[in-house]
Amino acid sequence: MIDVKFEDQGQLQLLDREEAEEEEDCFESIDKLISQGINAGDIKKLQDAGIYTCNGLMMHTKKSLTGIKGLSEAKVDKICEAAEKLVNMGYVTGSDLLLRRKSVIRITTGSQALDELLGGGIETLSITEAFGEFRSGKTQLAHTLCVSTQLPIHMHGGNGKVAYIDTEGTFRPDRIVPIAERFGMDANAVLDNIIYARAYTYEHQYNLLLGLAAKMAEEPFRLLIVDSVIALFRVDFSGRGELAERQQKLAQMLSRLTKIAEEFNVAVYMTNQVIADPGGGMFISDPKKPAGGHVLAHASTIRLMLRKGKGEQRVCKIFDAPNLPEAEAVFQITPGGIMDAKD
């Protein structure tokens, strides 16, 4: 049963009652530590540091927790012990894991051919990376996902809100309007359910991710878009001398993205740039490879390579995925977003 609910700001939100109740069980709020004897002041310190769930707490090292102002080693040990009682972070059986995987939501891209290639759509609990040259459709896919994520589950949506971190200044709210109309949704309500931030440095980008936990703990988010993940790192670190530090900072950023995906059952869609690959082979006229090196390659769950086709058509190839075969799909960019290609 679906409720159409108007909130204070007059924004429209689709809520499936049963799904909303199930979602509450996907993480344990940090406030539950009070029942384990942890005082409210210490919980406030954890929240100020961007930790809002017990699952998120267990994803931090004790070293990083003792770095929080006002938390001693003894306090951190006590907090971690209390969290372990609430959250099972140990071994589970394969059957349990299979049951847990049923909470994965696959969000439609707007193109049936692309959805089939991805096994149903962009999935939650994982990072999907799309790389390709400029004008290959990476940001257009991001704009379409901003709308399709807000569709109810039975319409292959995510029934949730969207967070968009823009490092290149390419998000256009007016682009969302025709896409929302195509899906039969109220454009103003759709825009109200997208939170947007423009990042200017890699540190700003990381801090925006830290601040996101507070919002995701309170409201049902289903998608986080980072467009693009590497751009600011290529600007803020220059030359080979700073490459090691750049890759380390990039690894921390990607680790944070992975934790957000798993902590809040969110789909992370990030775009990546390409660089020239001189050793790419003699038979390729203009060899390119994704930026970010091995650090980025290992962090992404699913890697998609996008390239231009004829006219408005684009080709998507599965470059790397743990459970999908290497294959291609053709889609088209239209005023209403990503659609199946018309011959």
Image (cartoon, grey):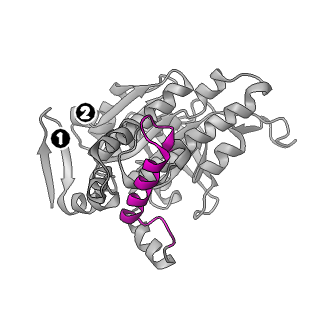
Left or right: residue 38 compared with residue 133: left
Instruction: Tell me: residue 52, above or below residue 336.
Output: below
Considering depth in this image, is 145 or 43 the residue closer to the camera? 43
**Residue at figure coordinates x 62%, y 35% from the top left:** 249
Task: Answer whether residue 173 is visible to the viewer in this image.
Answer: yes
**Amino acid bearing label 1:** Leu
What whole-number distance in Å separates the C-alpha atoms at marks 2 and 1?
A: 8 Å
**Residue at figure coordinates x 24%, y 61% from the top left:** 19
Q: Is residue 98 magenta?
A: no
Among the 4 quarters of the image, the one containing residue 197: top left
Instruction: Tell me: residue 107, above or below residue 335.
Output: below
Q: Secondary structure at mark 2?
A: helix
For mark 2, what is the residue?
192
Q: Secondary structure at mark 1?
A: strand
Left or right: residue 249 compared with residue 81: right
Give the magenta part as a residue range.
65-91
For mark 1, what is the residue?
12
Left or right: residue 62 compared with residue 318: left
**Residue at figure coordinates x 67%, y 37% from the top left:** 248
Task: Answer whether residue 334 is visible to the viewer in this image.
Answer: no
